[in-house]
Image: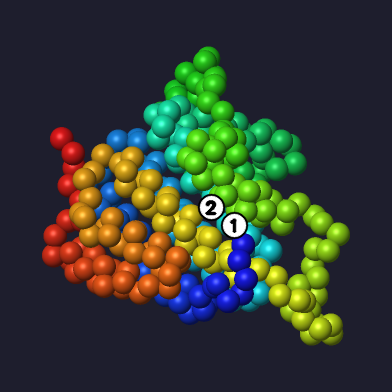
Amino acid sequence: MGEPKDYLTFDQYRDGADSLYSVSGMILFCFAKHGGDKRNLIIRNFIARSAMMLKGIFKLWEISDYQDAWIIHRALLDRLFHLHDLGVKNEFSEFDDWSFYQQFNAQNKIKSDPLFKEQAFGWVYELTDDKKSRMKSLSANPPKWRRPKAEDVAKSMNLNFLYKYGYDFASSHVHPMADDGYQDFHTITKLEPAPRFVDHISVLSNSILASSMILQEAMNLSSFRWRRVLWDYVEQIRLLLDKGSDEYATSFLKVARMSLETDLCEKVT
């Protein structure tokens, strides 16, 4: 996990994360412009979720809510492992059917409950003919897709450390522990000496790494051919984390300029 001296400043991490968020947005516009099938739509959504989660982690860190930052970091890694597994097994369609089936059943359960059925209104509960027909078909042959195990996927990626020191470590913040709230007590009341140094700043570095990996995985799995400058940018974001290099800023400007002048990708025929 490293000593405090091994880490960059919060501002350095925040600048890198802000640029990653912006590049993710530019890539999302490429997906919107060129469209695509169900596979590309799911990949697009993974990028968007990753970008928002990264921004959320930094916002939580700024208010000293480190525990929730770790919880979102765990969820971020979960999405990395899911996306990689979907790509390896080419199960995007199965994942989409399973997701629809699970969400439909959850919504229908609320609508059928006498205590809450009067509150089940709005677009999320609206059942179009297409949705009804799809659910009827899926009910006759329920999706057999299952969520991948994070540890297994990390091992298959030769990235066990992401599971051990990211996903598994962050899991200790998801469920109640005896010392939960110790940091929060001090943050809110200032009545006790500040807790001794805990390696919370690593959640920033680790989350930038995870988000950049999701972006890289997404570009690899999409049906588009991406400009070389995007790959350079991702590589240089890693250099920021590894060596504190600010080379990524130059690539970021190139990406931003190119996104205004031409397409950042082209559809593979």
Q: What residue appears at the point 81 percent right and 70 percent down from the top-left corner? A: 182
x and y percent of residue 214 in the render?
42, 50
Q: In which quarter of the image is residue 56?
A: bottom right
Q: Which colour scheme is used?
A: rainbow
Residue at (76, 72) in percent of width and height: 183
Tell me the element at label 2. helix
Label 1: few (<14), some (14–19) or many (≥20) C-alpha neighbours in 10 Å: many
Q: In which quarter of the image is residue 233?
A: bottom left
Residue farthest left in this picture = 261
Per the rendering, the mark at residue 76 is 2
| Position in image of residue 129 (x %, y %) | 43, 28
Q: Which of 169 and 158 is in front in this view?
A: 158
Of residues 161 and 174, the one nearer the viewer is: 161
Q: Is residue 22 visible?
A: no
Q: Distance between the residues labelled 1 and 2?
A: 6 Å
Quadrant of the snapshot with the C terminus: top left
Whether residue 251 is visible to the viewer of this picture, yes or no, is yes
Residue 9 vs 82, above or below: the answer is below
Q: Residue at image x 58%, y 76%?
A: 5
Instruction: Please tell me the numbered disc located at residue 72.
Output: 1
The quadrant of the rendering that contains the N terminus is: bottom right
For the residue marked with disc 2, what is the amino acid? Leu
Residue type for callout 1: Ile
- Percent from the top left, x then y, of residue 215? 38, 52
In which quarter of the view is residue 160 placed?
top right
Is label 1 in a helix, a strand or a loop?
Answer: helix
